[in-house]
Amino acid sequence: MTSRFIETLKVPGRCQFGTWVKLDSPETIECLALAGFNFIAIDMEHAPLTFQASYRNIVIAQGLGLKVLVRLPDSSGAYAQRILDCGADGVLIPRVRSEQEARDVMTGMIFSPVGHRGLGITSRAGHWGLKPTAQYVEEGNNHVLRIPQLEDPGALGDVEKILAVPGVNAIFVGPGDLALSTGKPASHPDNSQLITNLINVANRLNIPCGTAVGDVNAAIKAKENGFNFVMISNDISIFAKSSASMINQLKS
C-alpha cells in the first residue's frame, strides 16, 4: 500500500519537493512525474484553473505516482469539500489571518458531528461508492492534509493558536506575501524571525511545515532550515526560464 502524504511528511529528516501547477496540461504533469518530483500543488488561487481542470489533473497526477495538493481560490473554503471528494491528498487554504478564520474553514473539511463536511461516499474519494463508509470518513478526517497558509505577521504571531485548531494538520508560510504585508524584504530579520518561530513551533508539535521558493539553492536551504515540504518555482516559470536561458545563450 502506498504511504499517505501526511505520513511521508512526518518522517524525520525527510523533505518532500514539489512545484506549483498553473497549466492545464497532462503532458507537463507527466514530465514532472518523470523528473522525480514528489508532489504537485495545483494552484486555483493564482492560475485560471477551473474546478473540472483541477479534478482532471488530480486524477492524472496520482495515476503517475505524484501526491497532490490543491490550493483553493480563497480562504472561504467554498471549494474545499468538492476538492477533497475529488481525492486530493490535501488542500492549501490561502491567506488565513486568524485562529477564528482557521476554525471557520476547518469545520467544512471535517465530518459531522465535529464539523459539517457532507457525506460524499459516491465520489472519487469514496471510490465511487465501493469504499466502506466508515473508511471514507476515517480517511477524510485523519489522513488528508488541511493546510492554512500564513502570510501576515498577525497570523504568524498567533501560530500556536492556529496550530491548535481542530483539523489543522500541516502549515505553510508564504514569504512573498509576508514581505508585502510587512512592507519589509523577505530576507529582513523580522520576517526571518517570524518564519523561524513557525518552523520551531510546528516541529515541536510534529506538524509538517512547508513553504515555496524560487530555485533549487533556496529549496536546499529551506530543507536545512527544517521545512518538511517545499514548492520550487512552478510549471510555466520552469519552462519560461529554461526557454529564455537557451535563447540568451544562443544570442551571446
Image (cartoon, grey):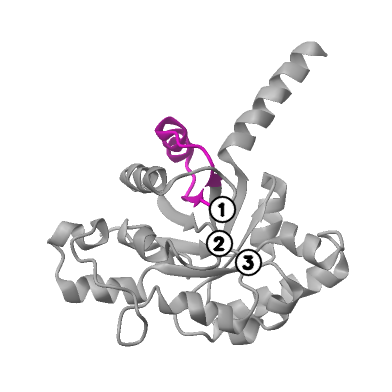
Q: CA distance from mark 1 to mark 3?
A: 10 Å
Q: Residue at x 59, y 42 (%)?
A: 234
Q: In terms of depth relative to the viewer, which is nearer, 41 or 177?
A: 177
Toward the viewer: 142 or 184? 184
Q: Nearer the viewer, mark 3 or mark 2?
A: 2
Q: Position of residue 128 (x, y in %)?
A: 17, 57
Percent position (x, y) of residue 134?
18, 76
- In the image, the segment drawn in magenta is 20-45
Find out whether residue 40 is within the magenta segment. Answer: yes
Residue at the spot of label 3:
95
Disc 2 residue type? Answer: Asp
Closer to us: 178 or 7: 178
Dot 3: within a 10 Å radius of its alpha carbon, few (fewer than 14), some, or many (20 or more) residues?
Answer: many
Q: Amino acid at mark 1?
A: Glu
Find out whether the residues at labels 1 and 2 contact each other: C-beta distance under 8 Å. Answer: yes
| Local secondary structure at mark 1 | loop
Q: Report the disc number at residue 45.
A: 1
Tell me the quarter of the picture where residue 157 sits.
bottom right
Instruction: State the SS at label 3.
Output: loop
**Residue 206 in sight from this viewpoint:** no
Q: Earlier in the sequence, mark 1 or mark 3?
A: 1
Q: Which residue is mark 2?
A: 74
Vertical placement of 217 versus 16: above or below?
above
CA gap, disc 1 and disc 2: 6 Å
Could you tell me which secondary element the residue under label 2 belongs to?
Answer: loop
